[in-house]
Amino acid sequence: MLVTISTTGGAGRPATDLGFLLHKHPGRHQSFTVSGGTAHVFYPEADERRCTAALLLEVDPVGLVRRAARGGRNGAARPAPGHQAGALAQYVNDRPYAASSLLAVALGQVFRTALRGVCDARPEPARQPLPLRIAVPALPSHGGAELVHRLFEPLGWRVTAEPVALDPHFPEWGDSRYVRLELEDDGATLAEALRQVYVLLPVLDGAKHYWVTPEEVDKLLRAGEGWLSRHPEQRLITGRYLHRRAALTREALERLELARLAEADDAEPEELDNAVPEEPEEPEGPEGLEGPERPEGPEERPVPLAERRRETILATLRELGAERVLDLGCGSGQLLRLLAGDHRFREVVGVDVSVRALRLAARRLRLDRMPERQRDRVRLLQGALTYTDSRLRGYDAAVLCEVIEHVDLPRLPALEYAVFGHARPAAVVVTTPNAEYNVRWDTLPAGTFRHSDHRFEWDRARFRQWAETTARRYGYRAEIRPVGPEDPEVGPPTQLALFRAAAAGADGEREQHREQHRGQQTRPERHRRGEQEAGA
């Protein structure tokens, strides 16, 4: 099987720079032992105006079958799908001739440094787009030429995919599943181009010749960095690359979504995926008890503030008669577990940006062991609350339990619009710390917040002002309630705002604010909203 990579040169940049970028000298033929056989690198042409590097892989199909028979989990080859032991198909197949995961592996091994974009001899060309042409004479495509276009054109390639006839002497037999592929682009670096081909070759083939392990997720995300998270066929690519392994595909898609959200927020994925520790612990300090006093009786146990908060939210939702509930910023699922255990709530959806938090929530809920009828009531979704999401529209109630104080104040209007303006549940329950009560915590130094990740903590007047302004802006009525024992001087430890959607009115003001908000949005926010509304 064969792949060629060509470029052209110009003033001050000879085409033979391709040899430096690939770390393979144009004047030599080199051979390498790879897992599928022997790979040869040579240059059919190499001058200042045009240079072509060829990677030719000689596959040993008999060796592949023998290694598979010895057991493939230690890196040995995997049998071709559908083969039977002793069948002729083990030895007579398209593996030696058609580009597949065998060629992708050889590409990754032979051009390992080039895939990373590293070139000490020519650092500038390694970082700059090149005029590139990549050709694969025989490429299997489960999906035909149309799928080839769907995979490569969104990446900026000009694609020529000519179907290969089953037999040119008998055109009535139609086309085979193979195409002759040519890709051309002037806007990609060599490293980007190689990584895209490395991922998409086995995707088009639809089969992998080796065992797919969890390490393949990391390989996919490394090779897909910068392009896969935005690709319209992301789900198909991920599923096929990971050989349709459901758990691995789900993990990869979650990490890709986190990377995309981080890119839109100009942040690192780790900054978003830090909602909970790996193993949640019982709350301590200010969040642990309801107040500074300790009970004296040996049988009495102080009720944790977090527990009081969840019980108050449940009572409020029951008062509303809500049946379909969103837990926005669900974390590791403490409130979700209570909601799922109460059959008055016939649909419960937890939303969080953190993949780690959602995994802990699934574990806490025991989703894998939950009866199917109950499991159908519960869903976990990954998403950032500062972006509109049409999946969240039409619910009876939404809960933001200790969430808003984790949002940077300049981003809070985006959350308000996403929840109150776009999702528009019939009711919204918001809880947040009462900053005045902090003086009652003996262990909390003056002037500090209750949690290291809090961006702000409001006193009662500021929270009431925010609630009433937000309610008026989006057509809700706001009611402030206490959570926990009220101190006569500083109020309750937690404050709750209950928003109920107004039946009518304030439409003009809401629409005016909506337009102002759209005008103030950053480009990634507008792009994100357009993507989600189109997808819905």
Image (cartoon, grey):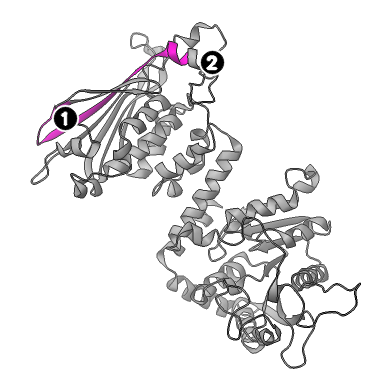
Residue 532: x and y, percent? 52, 56
Residue 465 drawn in magenta: no
At a point 69% along the width and 57% down the height, the residue shown is 349
Which residue does the numbered mark 1 point to in the structure image? Answer: 26
Q: Estimate the x, y position of residue 322 in percent, counting from the top left.
A: 78, 65
Q: Residue at point 79% right, 67% down?
A: 314
In the structure shown, which secondary structural element does the residue marked by tag 1 occupy? loop
The vertical placement of 173 against 42, above or below, is above
Q: Nearer the viewer, mark 2 or mark 1?
A: 2
Residue 22 visible in the shown view: yes
Q: How many marks?
A: 2
Mark with earlier residue (2, 1) = 1
Task: Characterize the local packing of mark 1: few (<14), some (14-19) or many (20 or more) Cα atoms within 10 angstroms.
Answer: many
Question: Could you tell me the amino acid type at mark 1?
Answer: Pro
Would you say 375 lies left or right of 520 here? Answer: right
Q: How crowded is the residue under tag 2: few (<14 C-alpha within 10 Å), some, or many (20+)?
A: few
Q: Pointers 2 and 1 in contact (CB under 8 A)?
A: no
Task: Please state the extent of the stretch shown in magenta in the rendering.
Answer: 44-65
**Residue 365 to residue 141: above or below:** below
The label on residue 70 is 2
- Point out residue 178 in the picture as x, y percentages from the top left corner: 39, 22
Q: CA distance from mark 2 to mark 1?
A: 39 Å
The kind of residue tagged 2 is Arg
Residue 130: quadrant of the picture: top left
